[in-house]
Image (cartoon, rainbow, N blue to C red):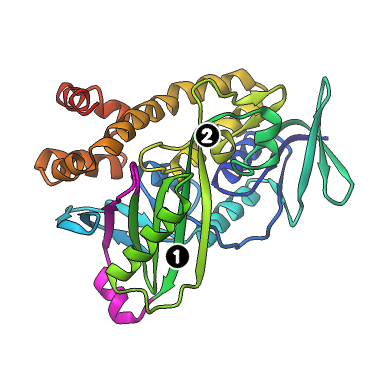
Amino acid sequence: MWDVAVIGAGPAGLSAAYAAARAGARTVVLEKAEHPRYKTCGGGLIGTSLAAAAARIDVPADDQVDRVTFTADGRRSFTRRHSGRLLTMVRREEFDDRLRVAAVGVGAEIRQRVAVRGLEQGPDDVRIRLADGSELRARVAVGADGSAGVTARHVGVDHCQVDLGLELEIPVPESVGRDWRGRLLLDWGPLPGSYAWVFPKGDRLTVGVIASRGEGERTRRYLRSFVERLGLDGLEPAHDSGHLTRCRAEQSPLRRGRVLVAGDAAGLLEPWTREGISFALRSGALAGTAAAGGDLDGYVGAVHDQLVPSMRAGHRILTAFARHPGVFHTMLATPAGWRMFTAFCRGETTFDETLTRRPVRAALALLR
C-alpha cells in the first residue's frame, strides 16, 4: 500500500511526486515511457515556471531570450528587446529528467515502462491496474498522464477548448543558430486564434503552429508556408509531431474520490498562449501536497484560487484576439503593450491581474 501513486512522469507528475515524498508520503510514480524521452513542446519557460522549478533543479537552459520579433501572417514585422531575460528555452527531455532526479532525491520511487490500464476505487484505497496484469494500491492517486490519459477519463474531465499543435524540431547549421540566438519569433496566423513560433535551442530550432481543432489541413498548410517563409524548408527535421491541447471547462472536476488530476490531465493551461508548463508545475505541487496531507478538497480549492482566474482571463483575451489579431499586433508595438508582454513573460504579473487595469478592460470591451 503506497500513500501516493502518481500516474505520469512529466512536469505535473514529477512535481506531485516531489511534493508528496518531501512531505513524508510513500510515493511511487508510474511512467509508460522512459526518461529521457522526447516530448512535443515549445519548451519556453516563463518566469512563473522558473520560480516553480528553481527550488528543485538547475534548469538546463539552451538559450535565454531577450528579443522578440512579431509578425502578422508574415507581414508588419517589428522586433523589441528587453534588458533582461524574457524566456528560458529548454529541451523537454532534459528538463523532465532533471525533475525526475529531484523527485528520486527526496524519496519517490520512479517505475518506468509501466503502462496503466485502469483505476478502481474502494472506500480506503485506489487500485491501479497495470498492462502486465498486476495491480498496485495507494491511498491517493494523482493523475498526470495527459489530457487523453486514463485518469482524465476516470475523473470525467470536460473540455471547452481543443487545439491542434504541429511542431518541428529542426537541427540547424551554426550560422543559422547564431542568427536566432537570444531571439524568438511570434507570428499571428491566418486562422482565428492561431499563431506560430520559432524558439531557439542552440543547435536546433523549434518551429510550430497552433490553431483550433477541426482546421487540420489549413493548420498544416500554415506550418508549411511559415517554414518556407523563414527559409528553413531545406532542412530536415529531427522530429515532426503533432498533439492536441485540451483546456478544461469551467465546471470540470479536478478530483473523483481519491483520484486527483493535475496539469494536462486536468486541462489546466492558459487558453490564449496555450502555455501549460507553469500550470503543470504548480498544479502538480498542489496535488502532491494535498495527497500527502489527505486534504483532497483543499487541492480543488487551491486550483480555483491560484490557477483558474488566469484561465478565465485567458479565455477573454483569446476571444478578442481571434476576432482582432491585427489590433493585438499594433498594441504590442506600443510601449504599454510591450511592458505588459514582458511582465507576463517574466512572471511579474498574470493575465487576471492585467485585466484589473481599467484601460485594458476598456480595450477588451471594444474588441468584443
* Separation of marks 2 and 1 at Cα, in angstroms: 28 Å
Precedes in sequence: disc 2 or disc 1: 1
Q: Which residues are magenta?
A: 172-194
For this orientation, the residue located farthest to the left is: 335
Label ID, residue 84: none
Q: Residue at x 28, y 69 (%)?
A: 230
Q: Position of residue 358 (x, y in %)?
A: 17, 21
Amino acid type at image mark 1: Leu
205 vs 222, nearest the viewer: 222
> Compared with residue 201, is residue 165 higher up or lower down, i.e. above or below?
above
Q: Position of residue 136 (x, y in %)?
A: 83, 40
Q: Position of residue 246 (x, y in %)?
A: 52, 39
- Reading the image, the residue beneath label 2 is 283
Q: Residue at x 39, y 55 (%)?
A: 209
> Compared with residue 318, is residue 113 higher up or lower down, i.e. above or below?
below
Give neighbour class at mark 1: few <14, some 14-19, many 20+ (Cα, 10 Å). many
Q: Residue at x 65, y 51 (%)?
A: 104
Q: Quick one: SS at disc 1?
A: strand
- Reading the image, the residue beneath label 1 is 168
Look at the image and tell me in which quarter the C terminus lies.
Answer: top left
